[in-house]
Amino acid sequence: MKFGVIVFPGSNCDRDMMHALRDDLQQDVVMLWHKDHDLSMFGQDDCIVLPGGFSYGDYLRCGALARFSPMMEQVIEFANNGGKVFGVCNGFQILCEAGLLPGVLLQNENQQFVCKNVFVKSANTNNIIGRNVGDKVLKIPVAHGEGRYYADAETLEQLNKNQQVVFRYCDERGEVHINSNPNGAINNIAGICNAGRNVFGMMPHPERASSSVLSNIDGQHILQAFTYMN
Amino acid sequence: MKYTAHINVMPLKELLDPQGKAVNNSLHNLGLSQVHDVRIGKHITLHLEATNKEEAERLAQEACKKLLANQVMESFDFTLAEG
Amino acid sequence: MQATLEQAKKLGLREEEFEKIKQVLGRTPNFVETAMYSVMWSEHCSYKNSIKWLKTLPRDGERLLVKAGEENAGLVDIGDGLGCVFKIESHNHPSAIEPFQGAATGVGGIHRDIFTMGAFPIASLNSLRFGKMDNPKTKHLLKGVVKGIGHYGNCFGVPTVAGEVYFESCYQTNPLVNAMSVGVVKVGVGETVSATSYGPGNPVFIVGASTGKDGIGGASFASADINENSAEQLPAVQVGDPFEEKKLLEACLETIKTGAIIGMQDMGAAGITCSTSEMSAKGEHGMIIHLDKVPTRQNNMKPWEMLLSESQERMLIVVEKGREADIRKIFDKWDIHCVQIGEVTKDTNLKYYMNGELVADVPAESLVLGGGAPVYEREYSEPKYFEEINKFNPADIKIPADLKDVAYQLIQLPNIASKRWVYEQYDSMVGIGNTHTNGPSDAAIVRVHGSEKALAVTTDCNSRYVFADPYKGAMIAVGEAARNIVCSGGTPVAITNCLNFGNPYNPEVYYQFVHAIKGMSAACTKFNTPVTGGNVSFYNQSEDGPVYPTPTIGMVGVLESIEQKMTLDFKHAGDFIYVIGQNRNDINCSEYLHQLCGVTHSPAPHFDLEEEAKVQETVLRLIGEKLIRSAHDISEGGLFACLLESAMVNDLGFSIHTDKDIRKDAYLFGEAQSRVVVSVNPTLHTMFEAELKGAHFTMIGKVNANKEICIDDEGWGYVSDWKEAYDTSLERAFLK
């Protein structure tokens, strides 16, 4: 099993993701350049990661320009064939722009960038992350200006019905309420997956919570999930 | 009288527009090579009440100068329509 | 066409300077040349009114691989074949005009200084000064500056790990925005690169953004008093593009690894003029530059406009001849302009051509600091306001009856209250190196990937102390920076400084400058922290007068292992609380005295260099011996604010007793220096006290399990309530 981390121009969490996967979780990691077209070395057990950052400076709309990077055609095909794809923060935004995940990430409710530790909990165990995390409350940092998840009522209903909500923002005790929501996301949604449960996106950064040096290894529960078979 | 102002706020021509530049390059990468000089600004609409068009224009000007445009970096223009 | 004296004066040159240019050239300069000299000989580029005194600062040390002034930033050996490159710089005047872009480009500029030497920036800091919080203008500036710093730093992908924000009316029209960047580089050939140029025939490239008319004359602009017309002095504003800079960073570091780079320098103030002349002067060669080859954003730019443009995100690179293709390939990969605009010559003149026509021809050496740029000695005299300071008598201040209420007000003052509203807008965690988030300490501790080591970084300056006593105040700034690093487990190694002062032609301002330099020298010598570089910003004043003299210190320390890190939070109920150092009967210059008692003029608080060094040596030893569980230095807000900060992190209470020989307000809120609060495991307290070896210390109380604050057996309420007030004060001030 190996991870492929895509580097877009303006990605700035690509190295962090590599360090977390390679140094903290002892996984094989291949860095991929956005202008390349070849994902043939990746199979069903592998995982393609779209890291956080500011691809294309977040210009126009977050993720809108990266979505047209040459590599994204391959990612879409890889995902459609059932390969695991994981987008964090800007990676989540790109996956939404690319149509691999439903919904959109809007500007935070208070119109300010926010960087701090938040708490999330898994919404169900009907996906690889949920199964690995269980009912643990995880402390994971967020860092974004556009992280307010939004989807129309119909889409939301689908998400809930299919158990596609992966994480909700909660407080330290695991309670989900308006004060535990850092950006105004609808229904406190912090992360979702597609109907096929092989494409995942979340705003919080698990790679920033995977090292004992940083005194927080909660993120390992999330990253680890991708090393297991579906 | 009621008026509607349609206001465009654009980055000054002399200044770099990083967003426009990045979008310009991306359009080229998508094969739209005939496109050039992309600049990205804001479009703002607002309703206002004034006794006549001159006053409406003055109000809109004031709104632009005082708040809507940062004249150190942005220019603005607007059109007024009745109603 | 020859330039006239009138034109030269309009460009900011003095008559004798214009004469000097004629002497250098042996003829009257043309307009283009005059414009070039005007920016290169401006205060901003030439340091003409400060360099004499800057040279008196300690600039040597066994760890210094590159000394102050030799390169874009200092380079310090941190062991294991690694070096640390760091520098602080001001962007005060641009931020006064356009806070968002001013602050953003300040951040961009300082990072370029770091990666132009081959280092990867791993931490960003800033030091900000604004007017009073209740002034609407302050809110506008603060919002814009914070947003600008966040916009650039967050996108560029370097964590903002520490900083300071102060509010004082002297900064009302002239805020200070000082940004610092810290990078790490492997030391050796093909890793670091110099800002030099040599080897006749070697090609000269401009890389990065196109050149536009933005920021023309910015260097001259930074050297002028701010007046009402400033807002109309377009196009002094530059627009930053952090996305371009991020690509430029990656491409430049890849390029350096090819080994094909002779020299590299970023384009900041005075753009092409500054980079071509400084690199050529350093390498003792010249250049031929074809301006028509420079990629421009606008049509029909004139030669002087191109030479002076301060468009951001550009670099000048001299490449080994024959290796051009290797370099082009990398910049193509990153979709960045990379255009050859000239070549190195043996002749040491700079010759600029436009469509084949020679438009300027000047000796490189004559333009630059350390070469032909003028050096002035300014007069100084003791400031009149010292009389008022000396009149202060603490006995005139009655000790308030309700000290709890005073404390409650104090911790909500904007200078003391949490800066959460500010720092949550900065990405402080990208790079997964900042250990502060889950383990706060006095200085931010950032790990160095691929090594056991960590860096301790901090910026410090209490400018009210410097105003009260420039010599002592500057010593305190250095002392506090070192204390912050020591309290975090680090060993201080070097500083960078950002010297923000008023108009140097004002003898009282110059007095402040000279004495601050002297104080800084004394302290840096004591702590063995040489000055690696920095920046001087004069003319920080408005109609109301100069700002407080503000010599911001950026200090870097080293932890051989991240395991040595010490945090500031109380850990266990029952732990003993000690003050290391001497508590004093001193309310001078404190936030308490200034803000709550309304005393604007009082002497600087107690500070003694020997005493400070002893305290630091003791604390570092205690950390090494693992005899303390937390360390936090006493600074603004005094002992009480310090205890509260240590208590809030883990919601633990504390109970302490004051000293009847010290006035109670001084005991709780006084800012006498050289004191550190530590908490100690009770079972270790005998060993701890033995290890103090004669250093001053007082046991003042214990950490509580009941989450309450108790002063002299009087209950002051729950820590969590104090925390709520402390955390939300700035946010509430915005809503007012």
Image (spheres, rainbow, N blue to C red):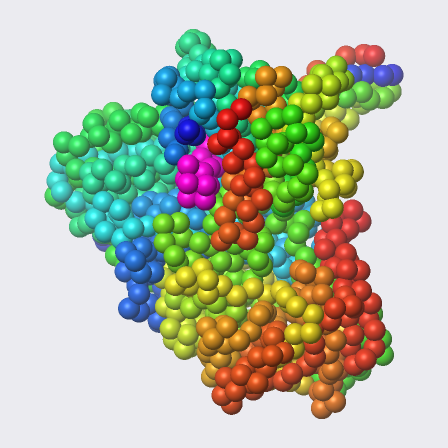
Q: In which quarter of the image is the N terminus of chain C?
A: top left
- Looking at the image, residue A42 sits to the left or right of residue A172; the answer is left
Q: Can residue B17 be seen in this view?
A: no
Q: Nearer the viewer, residue C192 or C225?
A: C192
Is residue A21 shown in magenta? yes
Residue C614 in view of the camera: yes
Residue C341 screen position, x and y as percent = 25, 31
Quarter-wise, where is residue B30 in the image?
top left
Residues C281 and C259: in front is C259
Relative to A79, say whether C411 is above or below: below
Q: Residue C345, position in %: x, y?
A: 15, 40
Residue B62 place in picture, x, y as percent: 73, 30
Residue at 68 percent across and 38 percent down: it is: A135
Q: In this view, does C635 lie above or below A135?
A: below
Image quarter of residue C231: top right
> In the rendered structure, does residue C262 fall within the stretch colored magenta?
no
The image shows residue C195 at horizontal and vertical percentages of: 27, 48
Q: Which residue is drawn at 48% across and 19% down?
A: A83
Q: What stretch is highlighted in magenta?
A: A8-27
Q: Quadrant of residue C337?
A: top left
From this view, report whether residue C730 is shown above or below residue C578: above
